[in-house]
Image: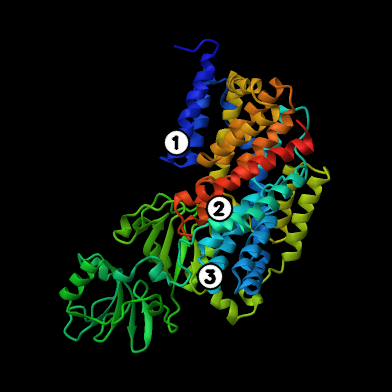
Amino acid sequence: MVPPGVPTAALVVFALIGVALALFVSEVIPNDVTAIGIVVALAALEPWTGVGAREAISGFANTATVTIVAMYMLSAGVQRTGLVQRLGVHLARLTRGSETRALAATIGTTGPIAGVINNTPVVAVFIPMITDLARETGVSPSKLLLPLSYAAILGGTLTLIGTSTNLLASEFAATLLDRGPIGMFEFTALGAVVLVVGLAYLMTVGRWLTPARIPADVDLVEEFELEDFLAELEVGPESPLVDRPIEGLDDRTDAAVTPLRVRRNGETFLAAETDQRFRPGDVVVVNGSRTAVNRLWRRFGLERADRGGVTGETLADADSPDRLGKAVVPETSRFLGETLSEARLEAFHGMTVLAIRRGSDLIRTDLDEVTLEAGDLLLVQTTPESVEYFAESDDLLVIPEDALDRLDEADPEQIAPLSPETPVAVAIMVAVVGLAALDVLPIVIAALGGVFAMVVTGCLSSADAYDAVSWNVVFLLAGVIPLGLAMEATGGAALLAEALVATGAVLPLVAVLFLFYVVTGLLANVITPVATVVLMIPIAVDAAARLDASGFTFLLAVTFASATSFMTPVGYQTNLMVYGPGGYEFTDFLRVGGPLQLLLSVVTTLGIVAIWGI
């Protein structure tokens, strides 16, 4: 039975939205795949959705989508100059020894940078520095990494290009309201207030609420609780392993044990990369459960060589180039959905995974069968070549254990050298911002022109430009944009707006605006901010018209609310990036981010009313 006054077409669109929301929250399939399904469903159900094939794929040609692609490329060009890395090196040196200085420098630097550069690579660059800086300062990295993510999110509210949601909102402002796109710095004054209030919270209340999940004085073996999973075994002269290849030991035995490295006469080499054979007197470090290790040494006549147990110091042999480290699996990784055996990190990159931290859970056995998920933190034995390789890709964010030690041993020019094209890349980025801010060119044309200039001047190769784009985000954008069109075409947005407008009978107008902010913020924390802004802006603009209020005011409330998702690790990509390295629990984001989101909902609502009226 169709409710009276509700068009069947609107019900069909609401049903699609319900299915999409369920898939977004559950992540049974990737969000970008869900978005593609939305496109197909909208076009297939055109008689009810009012969206034909051309409109269903219009998101790919949307100005906001194209601009976001260009901004990913421009951010990559600036990142490759080495400026952000150089800044991180200097901050690490200047703030060492003081938790307060370390926290202030971390959030005070990340926030403003994220206003003009995509915040994901900024956080990726800072995570290794912040992790080792925390250890050197004697503070838990958990106390710094969550504020790092939050500061990057806050910085996105400073300019039009700060986040993809800002660019989407600008497109809606031009199409739904009697005005043009949002200017580059049109809401910077409010963004600055939001940033200052947010940073003040992180330095005070947030600092107190942020937990120290990872102790400051533990090595990686202790951090991942691997003491009972590592052992040193010596090969005796009568062992059946003598003259057998070291590589593939785990394939020749039913014991679930992985050889990591072998010491021989003062020389150390990786078991995964060597073509050597076992000799009497070899000491091999293995990873596996205590039961499996015991089965191995009994079967092959080995002797326990570890006296006080294997520690991080045991694996930090100065004579060997390999090192322990951590690796974060980002949302852009091609390894997502693959098991470790399918990813073949050891075979292709000489990288052995010893343990996986997924939120507060530790996985240390049967690793080959574990399917990798975004936000997973891997404990790895890796090589300098692997670290260098993944530094140039978006598949893994590798954090070498000795990152900060290298800062003491070399000049910043060696650790973070500046590219010869640095002045050109910076000039191009400034020109893009300036041309858009002065309305000389639309932001989409200025951004595309900037990409063209960076490629032809050698600041960025075309291959690097394409690799820099988070295509899953692009497909998500292109998929959900026509959903907003369907809500408008079927009257669904008007129906929801009418329901929310009813609150205006009992609430003052500013309270209704506040309600829109709160609802949008909660929704952005469980689905993506991009999907939230697409769904909520048409409703907010329609509601404003019915309340005889400013549509731009309501649009800004939705924009800021969707861009500031602090309460869950899945609410924003940078939250997911620090989830594993900080050892956080899901509730930590609610405990620290909840009060911040409530505080900013009040500050932003009042700021919007004070600056733009209602």
The CA distance from mark 2 to mark 1 is 21 Å
Residue 557 versus residue 256 in the image, above or below: above
- Residue 23, label in figure: 1
Image coordinates of residue 481 in percent, x first then y, are: 60, 33
421 left or right, relative to 303: right
Looking at the rendered structure, the kind of residue marked 2 is Thr
Mark yes or no: residue 58 visible.
no
Quarter of the image with the N terminus in it:
top left
**Residue 329: x, y in percent?**
47, 56
On the image, the x and y values in percent for residue 466 come to: 59, 52
Q: Is residue 356 left or right of residue 294?
A: right
| N-terminal-most mark, 2 or 1 | 1
Whole-percent x, y for residue 127 in the image? 55, 63
Specify which label sits upstream in the sequence, 2 or 3.
3
Please tell me how crowded label 2 is: few (under 14), some (14-19), or many (20+) other residues with Cα within 10 Å: many
Residue type at the position of mark 1? Leu
Q: Three-letter amino acid code at disc 3?
A: Asp
Residue 55 is at least partly visible in this image = yes
| Tag in front: 2 or 1 | 2
SS category of the residue bearing label 3: helix
Residue matched to label 3: 132
